[in-house]
Amino acid sequence: IFISFFPAALRDPMAMERANLLNMAKLSIKGLIESALSFGRTLDSDYPPLQQFFVVMEHCLKHGLKVKKSFLGFNKSLWGPLELVEKLCPEAAEISASVRDLPGLKTPLGRARAWLRLALMQKRLADYLRLLITRKDLLSDFYENSALMLEEEGAVIVGLLVGLNVIDANLCVKGEDLDSQVGVIDFSMYLKNDIDDYRSEERNSQIASILDQKNYVEELNRQLSKTCVVPLSLDMCICLYLQLAIAKNNIIKLQEENQQLRSENSLILLKTQHHFEVTQGDVSVERDTYKQSRQGLDEMYNEVRRQLKEECQLRQDVENELVVQVSMKQEMELAMKLLEKDIHEKQDTLIGLRQQLDEVKAINVEMYQKMQSSDEEMKKKNDVISRLEEKTNQITPPKAQRMSPNHFVPCAFISSCLHLVFCCSVQISKLSLSLSYLKIRYSSSVNLQLEMDLKIEREWRQTLQNDLERERDSVAQLSTEALQINGLKKEFHRLQDENVQLKTICNDQEKALEELGSKLSESKLKIEDIKEANKALQGGQVWLKDKEATHCKLCEKEFSISRRKHHCRNCGEIFCNSCSDNELPLPASPKPVRVCDTCHALLLQRCSSNPT
């Protein structure tokens, strides 16, 4: 009905749709604001203009949505682009969480409708959509290039939504059935008003053009109805009757075919259900096996992890002990250096004491020589004194009296000689006393000092030898501990290699488990394999259960995680992959299926003996 307003948009259908949706959005928003202001109360869910507004917004947001394929068909969902708002605005996370927590919503469309109502009650609908249309790089994943949300009309609608902030709405989202509502726009709400209700002349011209188009369409319908009312001839009636009979026969045949197809469909459904139950049992058995193997691997992984933790703790302890031993060795080396320095100092002191002893000995020898020379001089002087005394004794006093005054000269000489002798004797006695005193002093002091120094030196030497022996013992002990530490390092490296090997084994087993899981998921989707297994069971053969087979029937190898179980589609026995990697078409199924080596050779022999 809006085609006449946008003649330039006729060339592009998407542009025409955008223009129509823009006009409908303008009408619904304006009508909602005017009616809400005249209503003067809080709006609820049953208010018709508000319901029409949500329907128009739903159509606007759906315009240009990309069709996504799903398991049940094609789907267009509004919830995808609206869910992006919580990433762009953290305040919208509360609304999204509330929508996800609603128990009655089951479809994405219902969640989108609930989100629009909550955003309107919060008065942030325009802000959230404005943030959304600014990120066209994110919207391009959900909308086509010419969609309304990616063009200028989307920005105009977001600008119009700002006026809705004057409306107070109290909507009950929890009790409504938003999933099954039909979003149809009711144009009668905007066409039944009188022309006088619109204020602008442009609106009057639009309504007039709409009414003219309506009258034109009604006139065309009347003309077509007149042309269709023409009397039919007899031949035409017979032809129409025959065509009616043929159509009835076709309808009866189609009904019979429909009934037959329904019966076949029910039979196929029963067979499929039986196949599904058998497959579900096999899948449950394989799932139990997978869980048991996974539990064993988890226990092995926990044990390896515990051993690795213990080895790491042991390595840390050994490294700490090594650091302590290295520090002790450094302290020992420092003590050895200090002891060597003390020994060198003591040796220097001992050398100095020996030099002093030699000097004292030299002084003693010199004093002894001086004493001998003084003794000899003293003896000579004593001899002289003795001779002089003899001469004096020979001289008598009478004889001296008879002498003349000229004879007094020898007496004076004699007295002077006696005085000299007395002085010499006194000095000799003094020298002898001083010499004896020096002898005693030097001998006592030097001997005591030397004995003390020698005793101290001997004690120092003994202590140094003891310390040296202790240091040698400690060095030997440290060397043995260093050898032990080297052995522990080698053991630690060996344990590290074992840990790496165990990790690789664990990773390989996890990969095998992942492959097993992928195989299990693929087995659920293989309906043809289920049909073949069911046909093989109906043929009378025994389908061996997985629990009963622990070894391959042909090579007798035990099954494990890497060596999986495979059923032969011909005999029903369980074999490994290498013994059942053959594929041949069986009479039950024209598609090639897995058979064992024995059945493969037997079937080839049959085919060669019976070429038909």
Image: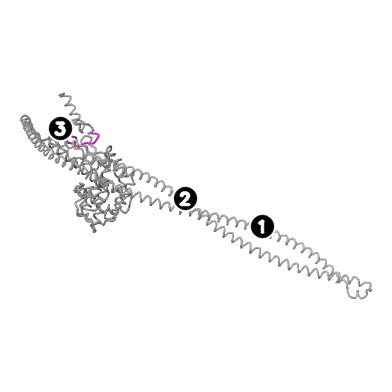
The answer to whether residue 271 is left or right of residue 43 is left
- Give the structural element (helix, strand or loop) at label 1: helix
Query: Mark 2 or 1, which is nearer the eye?
Result: 2
Above or below: residue 286 compared with residue 427: above
Does residue 257 lie above or below 437 as drawn?
above
**Is-magenta flag for residue 367?**
no
Q: Disc 3 on helix, strand or loop?
A: loop
- The residue under label 2 is which amino acid type? Ser
Sequence-first tag of 3 and 2: 2
Q: Using residue 105 as the reference point, say whether residue 333 is left or right of it.
A: right
- Read off the residue under disc 2: 479
Ranked by sequence position, the earlier of labels 3 and 1 is: 1
C-alpha distance separating marks 3 and 1? 122 Å
x then y, percent, for residue 79: 26, 47
Check the picture and name the quadrant holding the C terminus: top left
Q: Which residues are magenta?
A: 568-579
Amino acid under disc 1? Gln
Regarding residue 295, the answer to whether it shows in the image is no
| Three-letter amino acid code of the residue under disc 3 | Ala
* Picture quadrant of residue 602: top left
Q: Which mark is residue 588?
A: 3
Circle 2 SS class: helix
Could you say where residue 211 lies in the image, as x and y percent from the top left? 20, 44
Label 2 – label 1 distance at C-alpha: 42 Å
**Mark 1, residue position:** 355
- For marks 2 and 1, the one nearer the N-term is 1
